[in-house]
């Protein structure tokens, strides 16, 4: 059981900024996300697309904004060693249970068995937990060699990819699939699959022109094979239970045939699922948590909802609005959790206390 002041559900842009704001006010936070990387929609849906309306940042991509938020939150989300995740950032974990405790605070449990006891909860869950879209075929869910993510962090730390030196089939024809093809075709020799096949239902992709051009180039150079067909059934070898040995495909000629494989990476994009959140006793309006527009607290005292997951009169699903909500929610929680502490507003520019929390030496005092 991890004991903490605050638990932030969702490591999207608003969840990351929530950790920063809580840290400034002296509150320790743990953050959990079901995705294997931080950044929410910015990282999962539009990593390379431009954002023009973050105050003070005229232009950045979704991936760059995530990196900026992680850098800003570093005083409160520090990694113990280079290339490792911050100790309080828990990825690949779905928050399943959230229960108020009679003695105060909340117990929170993830699907991987991680348990937290916290004094306040900040639901920064966006449109819900992102889950990868899959192929609707029997045996896909349980197969040990079916993947949805390309874990670049593990690879950067020298952990070999499961498909290194083997035949990897990447399924999909959108940005996610084509980006994975490009990344893996250019991976280091130790990480690269020996054979790389892109499987799509037709010989046209629904991806950005630049990705399309690069992948066409790799196919023309013989570094990537393109197979056109609709997955029809899974093929499993009885001697290797749980392992997919091929996908049976329906080809454009109406014939079926097997595409042998060692590993399958499904890159059909992500879709958000509200999932367990609907069972946490929060008042929902059209799948969003109703909150006070002054504090962003839900109707359950101590549970806040910030970012795209909340609703209140005038709500706009914009990054800027989420950052504002996270700021006011942190201030409200700080006053509730530490009622005896002075609550006057401090500036990061001038406050020695905030400089101390940020780990910087301030030039001026005030
Ligand atoms: C294509 C596109 C372009 C956009 N462009 C702009 C723009 O230019 N300007 C702008 O202001 N906004 C833009 N937006 C909107 C902006 O991305 C969202 O407002 C913002 O991402 C909301 O952040 P969030 O942290 O609230 O939610 P999200 O980014 O959705 O993050 C929520 C996170 O919570 C996780 N989560 C949810 N439930 C659970 C659970 N039970 N357990 C574990 N994890 C969970 C999810 O996996 C997800 O990672 C754009 C959105 C899209 C789709």
Image (tube, rainbow, N blue to C red):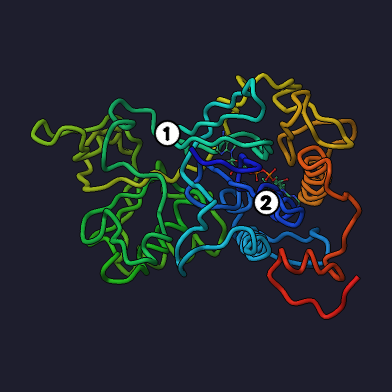
Q: What residue lies at 90% left-to-right and 55% top-to-bottom?
A: 345
The percent position of residue 353, horizontal first and vertical second, equals 79, 64
The residue drawn where x is 50% and y is 31% is 109
Residue 203 coordinates in the image, percent (x, y): 41, 49
Q: Is residue 317 left or right of residue 107?
A: right
Residue 342, image x, y percentages: 87, 50
Side (left or right) of 259 relative to 10: left
Crowding at mark 1 (Cα within 10 Å: few <14, some 14-19, many 20+): few
Indicate whether 178 appears above or below 247.
Answer: below
Quadrant location of residue 184? bottom left
Image spot of residue 174 (x, y percent): 50, 49
Residue furthest to the bottom: 363
> Label 2's element?
helix
Position above or below: 184 against 360: above
Q: Is mark 2 within 8 Å of ligand 1?
A: no
Give the mark, 2 or 1, whose residue is nearer the N terminus: 2
**120 or 155, which lies in front?**
120
Residue beneath disc 2? 19
Q: Is residue 38 left or right of residue 225?
A: right
* Picture residue at 29% right of the left edge, 64% below the top: 192
Q: Helix or strand or loop: what does disc 1 sit on?
A: loop
Which one is nearer the viewer's eye here, 301 or 286? 301
Are the two marked residues, 2 and 1, in contact with CB atoms closer than 8 angstroms? no
Query: Where residue 319 is drawn, which disc sits there?
Result: none
Q: Quadrant of the C terminus?
A: bottom right
The Cα atoms of the two marked residues, 2 and 1, are separated by: 22 Å
- Residue at image x 26%, y 43%? 145
Question: Dividing the image into four equal quarters, which quarter contains ligand 1?
Answer: top right
Viewer-side residue, 14 vs 263: 14
**Residue topped by disc 1:** 113
């Amino acid at each position: 059981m991890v004991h903490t002041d605050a638990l932030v559900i969702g490591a999207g842009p608003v969840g990351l900024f929530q950790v920063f704001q809580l840290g400034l006010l002296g509150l320790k936070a743990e953050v959990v996300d079901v995705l294997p990387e931080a950044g929410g929609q910015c990282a999962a849906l539009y990593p390379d697309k431009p954002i023009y309306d973050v105050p003070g940042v005229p232009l950045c991509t979704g991936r760059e904004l995530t990196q900026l938020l992680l850098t800003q939150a570093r005083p409160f989300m520090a990694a113990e060693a280079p290339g490792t995740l911050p100790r309080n950032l828990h990825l690949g974990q779905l928050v399943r249970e959230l229960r108020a405790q009679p003695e105060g605070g909340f117990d929170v449990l993830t699907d991987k068995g991680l348990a937290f006891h916290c004094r306040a909860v900040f639901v920064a869950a966006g449109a819900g937990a992102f889950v990868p879209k899959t192929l609707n075929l029997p045996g896909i869910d349980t197969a040990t060699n079916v993947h949805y993510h390309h874990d670049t962090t593990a690879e950067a730390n020298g952990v070999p990819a499961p498909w290194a030196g083997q035949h990897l089939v990447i399924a999909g024809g959108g940005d996610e699939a084509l980006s994975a093809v490009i990344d893996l075709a250019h991976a280091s020799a130790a990480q690269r699959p020996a054979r790389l096949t892109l499987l799509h239902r037709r010989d046209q992709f629904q991806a950005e022109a630049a990705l399309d051009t690069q992948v066409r180039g790799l196919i023309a150079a013989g570094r990537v094979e393109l197979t056109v067909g609709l997955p029809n059934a899974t093929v499993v070898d009885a001697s290797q239970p749980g392992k997919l040995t091929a996908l049976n495909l329906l080809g454009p000629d109406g014939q079926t045939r097997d595409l042998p494989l060692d590993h399958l990476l499904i890159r059909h994009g992500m879709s958000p699922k509200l999932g367990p959140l609907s069972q946490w006793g929060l008042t929902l309006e059209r799948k969003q948590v109703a909150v006070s527009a002054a504090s962003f607290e839900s109707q359950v005292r101590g549970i806040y909802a910030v970012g795209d997951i909340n609703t209140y009169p005038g709500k706009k699903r914009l990054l800027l609005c989420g950052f504002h909500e996270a700021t006011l929610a942190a201030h409200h929680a700080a006053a509730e959790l530490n009622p005896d502490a002075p609550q006057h507003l401090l500036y990061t520019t001038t406050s020695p206390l905030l400089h101390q929390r940020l780990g910087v030496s301030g030039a001026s005092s005030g």
